[in-house]
Amino acid sequence: MVCGVSALSTRAGQACAALADVMINGLSQDRVRRLSLLSPFLSEALPADWMKGIPTEAGLFEPEHWARSLEPLTRADGSSIAATIMPVLRDLDAGPEAAVKLGETLLRGKSLGVWREALRLGPASAMEMSLTTLRIADESDPANNVVWAKAADLVGAPRKHMRLLGLSSRSWPRADSVDPLLPDHVLSERDLVDLSRLERDRLAYEILVSHPGSCASLSRSRRAAEGAFLARSALLQRQVTERSLPRTRTPDHAFSQGDRLLARIDDALKLPRIQGVVSCWTDWTIRLEPTPHDGGFRKDHPAVVRALSMPQSATSLRRLLRDPLGFVWLRALGMTAPELAVEPLQLDPVTFGDLVHELLRLAIERIEPTPGLVGATPEEIDEALGAAAGDIAERWPLTQAVPPRLLWLDTIEEARRRARRGLTIDERFGPGTRSFSEVPFGSSRSAEGRIDPWDECQEVMIGQSGIRLKGRIDRVDVKPDRRGVRMSDYKTGTTPRNLREVTLDGGAELQRALYAITIRQLIPEASTIIARLVYLDTMGPAAALDADTLEHAEQTVLRYIDIAVDGLKSGAAYAGPDAFAGYNDLRIALPAALDRYRGRKLEGFNAAQQQLVPLWAEP
């Protein structure tokens, strides 16, 4: 490249880009990790695994977060890593004002030269733009490589084989124009250059095409980028014969294997992978009945059997019942949606729910066993929530991405308000009642020092299919004689209008039934079980199931779980209602034009899963 190569295409340019990214956009774990790999100073001063002890989910957007995270980390010789990196992080947090110091400290050789040149071209706050436009000398030997150059540069050293591009009426030769920075009434361009731009372009063209011993190929586009027709350049009006080369033509010479197959359709159709693609496309877009490309597989597939043998949660069983194909993708194939580590302005609904549950857990642990949640006063509950909120405010930024400080404190206050609602809604459940929070069951090992109403390592088996159940109940209240148990499942979403009428909600609301089944197995002496949904966004009463209503819900869930398991083992797993929902992370793996695909296949899917369809209509 006679005009040089982009600085960002080199390692030195990427080191500068990494530094500019942190300096302008602020600290984050991903940005600092990238800078530590590219900076000559940091790559030498820090061990290769210096961030091994830091959770990858942590955002670390402030120097204080870094200081607390790096405090326990040391080198092999016992010296502190924080002593090396913290001064650099504080300079980075200062922003563009420290651009010169940062460049001199973190960069060396070519990268430092690129950094200085970018600072010369523009202000430090525009460093990213300066690096984008900056070009450096191409070190490739021009005698051994194809040369890309302007016509004016190529005139000085014509090649034996040349191709001139852009010979359209709009592009070449270029028309004369007035320089907005130096107009003709101030200083005429002819006073500096004898020939006009138009004449210089014509002269360069004549020299190149008439150079003895050279072969020049002339090329132009027939349409502009906007689709408008382009006329040929005025330079091509004489002694030039045009030959149109359509984009869809069969090339004379294939540039790659892909080009060869594109040119020879018959050869391409003989390849198994191409046949598979054509078959898949046909099954998705033409055939109405379910096909193997829609979710079929062989009977008793080992991956599916292995997935069903693993402990299941209420969430995974909901996917099994309402989206069997998604269950196979997630549990058998391990497909997950990527998590983008950016500084959020607010927590996503799932993370906010985790925050509220963590507040509830810490508050209940502070209240139990004395004075006990059931007997605690509002002041004692507020005190416990305040202590829990303070602990979370300091600890969470070290383990996951949180909003900026003011928004983060406001988020905690909202979570605290909802948690207080969950702890003060309770009706009396009898004197001496013990309350437990975030109670695990079906776990492989028990946490030390934890007091639970049952042995959390005890297996919970449900249904005739023998599915192992594992999970965590938000709250469990147990009477002293263990004959009465009340479980609560907290929800941070919007309260449904028909909450009092919801039992299973088409298989979307399984927690109450599944947790009641769990309690019957782990506390067999319990004769009274109440399962509640508690929405924390309003002050409305909890939605409770008990007695015959709860038993009917349990039996219904167990029956449909067995049906779904039998369907998977028989080799059928098709998309259900949740597959097409907007909140489904796996929608991207479904065919494009999803609404039309659903319209074509819905009747066939329902027929193939006819035993599950009645569940989706359950209230």
Image (cartoon, rainbow, N blue to C red):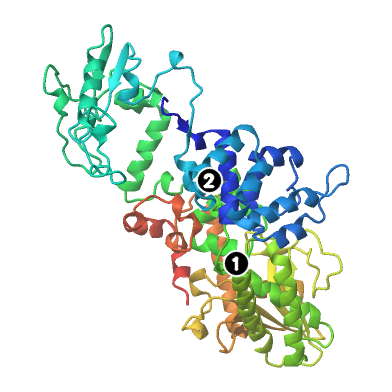
Q: Contact (CB < 8 A) between labels 1 and 2?
A: no
Which element carries disc 1, helix, strand or loop? loop
What residue sits 44% from the left and 63% below the top?
Answer: 582
Viewer can see residue 520:
no
Q: Give the residue drawn at x 44%, y 56%.
A: 575
Instruction: Name the quadrant containing residue 387.
Output: bottom right
Q: Is residue 444 left or right of residue 411?
A: right
Q: Residue at x 58, y 71 (%)?
A: 510
Circle 1 packing at 10 Å, graded few (<14), some (14-19), many (20+), is some
- Give residue 239's position: percent from left, percent from top: 12, 16
Q: Which mark is residue 299?
A: 2
For badge 2, the amino acid type reads Lys
Dot 2 alpha-carbon crowd within 10 angstroms: few under 14, some 14 to 19, many 20 or more:
some
Quick one: label 1 or label 2, which is nearer the N terminus? 2
As drawn, 133 above or below 513:
above
- Circle number at residue 403: 1
Residue 541 spot, x, y in % from top left? 58, 89
Q: Is residue 72 shown left or right of residue 18?
A: right
| Residue 486 versus residue 404 in the image, above or below | below
Residue most toward the left? 238
Horizontal arrangement in the rendering, residue 330 relative to residue 154 (left or right): right
